[in-house]
Image: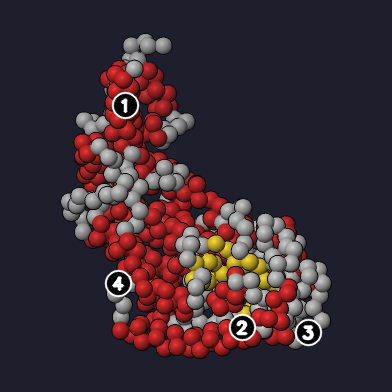
Amino acid sequence: MDGAANEAPHDASDLALLRAHAGGDADAFAELVRRHRDRLWAVALRTLGDREEAADALQDALLSAFRAAGDFRGDAAVTTWLHRIVVNACLDRVRRRQARPTVALPEAGPDEPADRRDAIAEHEVHLAVEAALAALSPEHRAAVVLVDVQGYSVAETAAILDIPVGTVKSRCARARARLAPLLAGVRNPDTVASVEVAESGEDNA
Amino acid sequence: MTSPASGPHPGVETLSDLQAGVLAGTAQESEVSAHLAGCPSCAERVGLLRNAQSLLAGLPAPSMPADVIARIDAALTDAALIDGVQAEPTAVAVLADRRRSRRRVGAGAVAAAAAVLFVAAVGIGTFQQRAGSDKSATASSRGSPGQGAGLVPQASGRTYTPATLAAGVRSLLAGVPPAAQGFGTPIAPGQSTRDSAVPADPATTLARLRQPAALSGCVTELAGRPGVVPLAVDYAVFQGRPAAIVVLPDPDPAKVQAWAVGPDCRPSQADVLRYQVVPRVG
């Protein structure tokens, strides 16, 4: 999982980059974006469920961060601050266009498993999960995307969303309660795949 | 432990609250736990909650697509030009480099970038000419023993500016000690320079950073992780301030990261005066 905890060593130099940018350095912000763009993209994509909307929201958010860097007070990690700006931009956008259906997201081509049938099955599972996420309220979706999809801790998520830890837990719990029946007939392809591998292994033995 | 379930079945929301720790420390927590222990159908619904969590965790982690990268890069570059963050006639190797990957750009931005590019090209050309003419005089000092894994820190005492940082870094990497400003001979670590043309003697002010351990702490801070070996280090002056020019590898093998840091660069305090990504070939 691509959690923020893995990136902790970046924190100090993230701050250095942000300070350098605020001091007029032309490259520092681009480097900061380069370090974190994939995770910020994933959060925007999963929160909005639409590629173009996610791109718009991320652009708005990063421009806003670019200009607000001088106001950063250092009371949170730079990544937390960036995530907060991105999530807020997504929530603004999703509130403006409530209840639009999720558009199917294209999955990466080069990483597609060689076995076409497995790939299709896996793709369908992902689409089902994305469709179920779209049924959640924006606030519940943001919380469960950060914790369950992106793997951030409850405490980090609370800092990103600027809400108490207890509220994060309760939003995640409500989101899972809503998702559980919607996804009752869907099974994790990883689990299925490993079973199949085990079976074929026995056949060969 | 499988006594028959007591009380009414809790709702799936309550079960989810229990799983998430929302009920921790409440009377309801023990009630629901007790019921769950003896109720297969509620245990099954907890299984569905876990299934949902597992499916969420199994969603692929997408990388930002190239078109979105290009678009955001362009928006940020335009914003920098509009906001005047790049007011100095400087970092234009970088601007030029970025322009290659940009898909769309305002006409104003192109004009501004072109104007800046011209100024910088003149500046870099001048510097390269000077460095070239001093090359023979300083060639004998190349390959002097260094600290650490093949790194040869220099102490040119040279004055770098935002405009000459890129070219200066490239000459460092080429093994040509920058010889401008009357500091033609690299200074041995610990030895002070006799020339006091700079406001603060860099050799003295930067004494701490000359210690391998202190330099290593600074480099770890800049790189964001330990174990990064700098490609070059030059104890010098940046815009009138004593500075270590630290050159680190960039994820893009065609580029390097140039950091100008002050004497206080250490873990959790980078003391960055300037940061620039520099193409290896100017």
Crowding around mark 1 (Cα neighbors within 10 Å: few <14, some 14 to 19, many 20+) is: few
Return the disc, 4 or 3, that comes first in the chain's sequence: 4
Question: In the image, is B65 to the left or to the right of B160?
Answer: left
What residue do we see at 44% from left, 49% from top? A158
Q: Residue furthest left?
A: A101
Residue B103's disc number: 4
Give the position of the N terminus of chain B as an image quadrant.
top left
Cα gap from disc 2 to disc 4, whole angstroms: 37 Å
- Given the image, on which type of amino acid does mark 4 rest? Arg
How far separated are the C-alphas under marks 1 and 4?
45 Å
Sooner in the amino-acid sequence: mark 3 or mark 2 = 2
Q: Marks 1 and 2: which is nearer the front?
A: 2
Asked if marks 3 and 2 fall on the same chain, the answer is yes
How many marks overall? 4
Q: Which residue is mark 1?
A: A197
* Residue topped by disc 2: B132
Disc 1 residue type (three-letter) = Val
Looking at the picture, which amino acid does disc 2 mark? Gly
Is B63 placed left or right of B272 in the picture? Answer: left
Q: Chain of mark 1?
A: A
- Give the distance between the C-alpha atoms of the residues marked 1 and 2, in whole angstroms: 64 Å
Any mark on residue B196, and which?
3
| B198 in relation to B59, above or below | below
- Neighbourhood count class around disc 3 (C-alpha, 10 Å): few under 14, some 14–19, many 20 upward: few
Q: Are marks 1 and 2 in contact (CB under 8 Å)?
A: no
At which x and y percent is residue A164?
44, 47
User: Could you tell me which secondary element the residue under label 3 belongs to?
Assistant: loop
B243 sits to left or right of A79? right
Q: Decide which of B1, B104 is in the foreground and name it.
A: B104
Mark pair 4, 3: CA separation: 49 Å
